Structure formats: C-alpha cells, structure tokens
Amino acid sequence: MLAPYLLSLPGGIWLIVLFLVPLIVMLSLSLQRCNPGTGACVMTWHWAEFGQQVSLYHAQFLNSFYFAGAATLIDLVVSFPIAYWIAFHGGNKKNFFLLMLLVPFFVSFVIRTIVWQFILSDHGVFLGTLKNAHLLPQSFHVLATGYAVIAGLAYNYLPFTALPLYVAIERIDKRVLDAAYDLYATRRSAFTKVILPLTVPGLFAAFLLTFIPALGDYVNQQVLGGTGDTMIGSVIQDQFLTQLDYAGGSALSAVLLAIALIGIFAYARLLGSRTIEEYL
Amino acid sequence: MTERNGSDPNESAIDPSIWRGLTQPRLSRRQLLSSAGTGAGALGLAGILSACGVKGVTATSGKVKPGGVGSASWWAKQKPTKTVNFANWPYYIDVLKGKHLSLEHLTATTGITVNYTEPINNNIPFYAKIRPSLAAKQSTGYDIIVMTNNSPALGYLIDFGWLTPLDQAAMKNFYKHAGPLIKNPAWDPGNKHTMAWQSGWTAIGYNSSVIKNPGTSVGILFDKKYAGRVGMMSDPQELGSVGLLAIGVEPATSTESDWAKAAKKLNQQKSDGIVRSYYDQDYITHLKNGDTVVSQAWSGDIFQADLNSKYRDLHLLIPSEGGMFWTDNMCIPMYAQNPRAAMTVMDYFYQPQVEAVVEYYNDYVCPVPAAKQVLLNPTGWAKTALKQMYPEIQLAPSVTADAPTVFPTPQYIKNSRSYYQYKSQEELTAWNNLFVPITQGA
C-alpha cells in the first residue's frame, strides 16, 4: 500500500531539497530587503518590489525575449534537417552523429562563447577577408551588436533543440510513409501532410527546452554584445554577484520564472496538454 | 452492468453505487499528492517566509578593544607557524615556469611555506565568498587576502571589524621602505589594517597607429571621431570616477549633484553611440584585437601588452585631468589561523630586493621606491633571480626601473587622483543607482 509512496521518496526528497526549498527561499528573498554590506536580510513583505523591478528592467526583459526567441527560431530551422536526417537516414551510424552534436559540450560554455569573439572579430577570418576584398565597409562589425548575441545563443543551445527533435522524429513509425506512398502521395505531400504534423509535439518540446534556458542566459551578451542589448540574465547576475542585492535579484528571477510559466501554460493550452505529458 | 431499456421508470437500471461513483468527485492519488503539497506549502509558507530574514552584523568601524584581537597583548600571544595561506589576484606575483622565486626565497630565509592561490578575480564576489565564514566567526581559510581600495568590499571588511589589525611592531621593513603614496593612505590611516601589494592607474589606453595625436585630455574617450570604438569599464566605481574627471571634478571631493552630472555625461556618451561596450578585465583583448582603439585601461596591462612586439602600438595616456590611482592591499582577515606568520610574509615583501623581483614581473606601481636601485644595480639573490627570469620576460630590468608607470615620477604623482570614500551604505547605493544602469541599460 505504502510502496508507491516509498518508491517516490528518493525523487521526492531530491525535488524538495534541491528544487522546492531553494525556490521558496528565492521567493521569500524577493520580499525582503538585504543590506549589501552585512548580508543581513529583513522580511518586509514588500510586494511592490516585483512591480518596481519590472518597471526598472522592462527593456532588458524585452531584449531577452527577442534574443531568445530569435535564437530558438534559428535553432529550430537548423536542427530540423539535422534531426530528420539522423532519424531517417542515419542508419547504424546514428549514435556517432548524435555524439558529434554533443562534442561541443565537452568544452566549457564560456570558452565556446569566447571563441565566437574570434570568429566574428572585426578583422578576423570572416570579416577580415570580406573587408580586404572591399565587400564590406571598414567600420562594419557584428560583435557588440544584437546579431552576435543571437548567433552565440543559437550556437550554444543548438543541441538542446536538435536532440528532442531527433527523439520525436525517431518515434515516427516509418511505415506511415509507406502507407502515404501507397495512397499516391508525392514525396513533398508525404512530408508536409504526414511527417510534419507528427513532429509537432517534438517541435513544441524543442522550442521550450531551447527558449527557457536561452531566456536566462547571461554569458553571451557580456562576451559578444554591446551597450544596448543587456539581457535580464546579466542584470540578475550583476545584482547577485556585484551589487550583492539578493532581494532585487530574487525578485527579478521570480518575475522571469512567472513569465516563463505563464508562457508555457499558454503554449500548452494551444497545443493540447496531452503533448506535455507524452514528450516532456 | 444491466442494459438500460427505459421501459420501467421505477426500476433502477444502474446500481446506486455506480451512480455515486460516476457523479461524485473522486480524489485520485495524483490529486491527493498535489493538493497535499499545496496545503502544506500554504501552511508553512507564511511561517518560513517570515523566518527567512538573516541576522546581520553591526558596524564596529574596526575599533580594537583593549586585550582584544589585534591589540599588542593579543599579538604577543600569537605563536609563529610554518604555513601561510595567501590569496591573491591572478598574474600578480613573479612566476618562472610555475615557480615563484620570491616565495622560494621566503621559505629559504624564514622557513615559512606559503600556500599561494589566485582565487580573487573581483573584489565583491570574493568578499561575498568569505563573508559567511566571517559572519559565523570562523576562519575563511586564508591568512592574507588582497583587496582593492576602490571597491566597497575593503570598506565593508574594515567597518565590520573583519580584518585583524596589523602588528605595527612587526612592520619594520614597511615603515623603512614604503613609498609615500601608500604610507598612511586615505582609506586606511596609520596602516592599521592594510599594507599595499601593488598600485596602478586606471587611465586611457589607445592604439597609437590609429590615433596619432591623442592629446592630453580625458575627453578623448568622449570623442565622436571614435564612435563605436571606445571601450569603457563596467565597474561602477571606475566608470563614475572617469565621468567625474570628464566634467572637471575631483572624485575624492565630489558631491551627489556632481555624480548626477557625471552620470548625465556618461549617458550622453552611450546614446551618442560612442561606447562599443562596457568591459570587465577583458578590455585589453579588445584593444589588442582592434575592436576598440581607445579604452579605459590599467597601467600594468598596457605595459605588459607592450612587451609583445605585436601590440607595441598600445600606449598609456594619463590625462591632465588625472588618472585614478588605486591600490591593492594585503590584509589579514579575522579568525586567520596563522596571523604571526602572515605578518612576517607581508613585511618580507617590503624588502627592496624582494620587491624588485616581484616588480620585474608585475610592472604595476611598486610600493617600495628603493627597489628601483636594485633593478638598476642588482646584487646577491636579486641578481640571480632577475637573471633567471630574463629569458621569459625578455626585458632588461633597467627598463622596468626607468618606467614612470612603475616608479612614479613627481609628475605622475601629481596626476594621480583618489577615489571617493563612501561615508555610508546610502551613499554607495546612491552612486551605484546612478552608474550601474548605464552599463546595464538596454
């Protein structure tokens, strides 16, 4: 009788200690006021904190949504062919190709981002050659703009998109393709009318798994961005590490969490909640 | 279940228990767990939330109680030990193929082994790392740490009594050899808690192959000619100070209205598109890359960049308005386990011979002016050490000795400006509220 509850105990304790408790502490901190010097935090039930933080940093929130959204769309467009090809035509080398997708993860996140500084450098490999050939004006630069941030985000989070997409596409029973061909479908209509709708839950999962982490990213903007494209993740990091304003940082994190949750539930309603349970 | 035929209205076609089951709400196991969670959460939340305040520490402004830690009688009781844990910034001590010659000489002459680590990359995050131990009255694991005077962290440490007051009687080398810039400084009168490690200027680094005539003003950072290629620092103290210099105000004596004007000028600089980005320590990479042609820079970084023939075009400009003079200070955190040995190590570095070897690598402002003569005419251990380091550094020691950015000339001393000393947390918050949004703004 008790067995199911006992079995869920390890996972439950893990979730409670490492997820619920920090979440509650964070929410509680947002209502407090912290002294940066002493580290003393006093509970003030300051509900207005959330509104204040949003009004102070609404531009950075919008930046984050814009960059994360653009990067996710690029990732979806790029990963779909990759995932499709590996799933349908990978043959017995599927694991190798999946490993190739994951190889960049062996390098530290920050180093991977800094490498893009060299790739996109004003006088580096790409821009330098184009400028020498007078195809670009000398003052043209990609670094220190929003485009470099989007490129960095898209690169860093590509495996998060490709892998769920691969999993979803792999599940499709290849026989439906045969069935479609039997029913006189062309290759194109077989793809658009049969395969694509079946991959929608995978697209949904891949979008979420890419968009949410990219939303809170703080490395790409600092390394590749300029003056006008601060993301909310950088603000939160600055508040926690440099300003030592734990209350403000927690409030911002709580607002980001709330926005993300609202977004997910709205998105789930659109595509049907059944898909969450099946694919996440 | 019997089939419904509806012919006899009095006959109940479906068993009443089944009706109950079909029409009454059922509590599934999942619903039970989720509601239990919410219930417990709601009950406990109020209690937990209000209990989540953290008791803080009151400011003691570092006063020493008679007989308390740091007093003469306390120091008399401290026994010398054989190890010292020294936490410093990276690339801040002489290094030759992984060995530190100055530290080896220290072990040879005093028998103390220094456990030298480089965990400090930024003042405030490091302060946040050691603060919990200090607040809990436990050892931080470090005997010597190095904090910059322009960061609030050093002020917090002194104000909250978290630095062991130094044993003035054990600072013989310091009082004999320390330079005027770092003896009895504004941030630590009487050197009660700190001894300088190195100093430097935050001034302007520029690429002389692009900028032929930089002029002498800090206005070069605000020049529209270099729009999109100017680097500024993201540290609020550095950014605000250069803003104050740009409006012709001395940072050390500035007022809040001055800060507002400086913030306005910096915001104007940003909206004019002059700034490429606000950098942390990596501004030097962008100067080297050519991404920026003029940038706020630290004097030692430019000196070290010039050692490499590829970057010899990078020069340092200390403007007529002044260069901000900062000092990294050695201090002993409270509850250190080896305070007596730490004093020995700190005073050891004030010997001109030792400092000459350290300075040969560092190229920041030397706290010991007498080291200049040692670099020009090395003898004894210093001579061997310098000779061993020469192949790696590829620079004659006399070049270091003659550099005004290492051994400041009176002109350079005249152009040095001090940072503003915050009198209260409110002042610091007001300053940060003005300048942090400039770097964080979208």
Image (cartoon, rainbow, N blue to C red):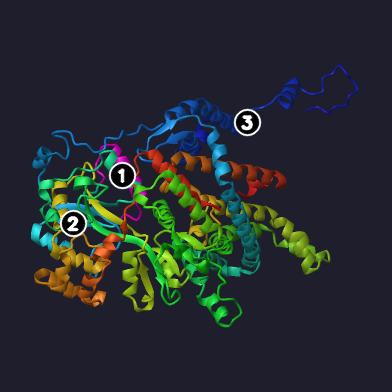
Q: Nearer the viewer, residue B104 or B424?
A: B424
**Mark 2: few, some, or many residues within 10 Å (few <14, many ≥20)?**
some
Q: Disc 2 on helix, strand or loop?
A: strand
Q: Residue furthest right?
A: B7
Query: Residue A164 at x, y = what percent?
Result: 60, 56
Q: Is residue B226 above or below residue B74?
A: below
Magenta-span inclusion, residue B137: yes
Q: Position of residue A198 (x, y in %)?
A: 71, 56
What segment carries the magenta color? Answer: B119-140
Q: Report in which chain the residue with disc 2 lies.
A: B
Q: Say which of B350 and B241 sits in front.
A: B241
Q: Which mark is residue B28?
A: 3
Q: CA distance from mark 2 to mark 1?
A: 26 Å
Residue kind at label 3, given as amino acid type: Ser
Taking A246 as reference, is B88 left or right? left
| Amino acid type at image mark 1 | Gly
Spot the residue most to the top.
B10
Give the total of numbered labels. Answer: 3
Q: Nearer the viewer, residue A250 or A10?
A: A250
Residue A257: % across, % down: 56, 43
| A209 sits left or right of B200 in the view | right
Tell me the kind of residue under disc 2.
Val
* Residue beneath disc 2: B114
How far across and how far down the image is residue B410, in percent?
24, 63
Residue A106 visible (yes or no)? no
Any part of residue A34 in sight: yes
Same subunit, tags 3 and 2? yes
Mark 3 — on which chain does it sit?
Answer: B
* Nearer-the-camera pick, A70 or B14: A70
Find numbered disc 1 in the image and state the secondary structure of the residue it sits on. Answer: helix
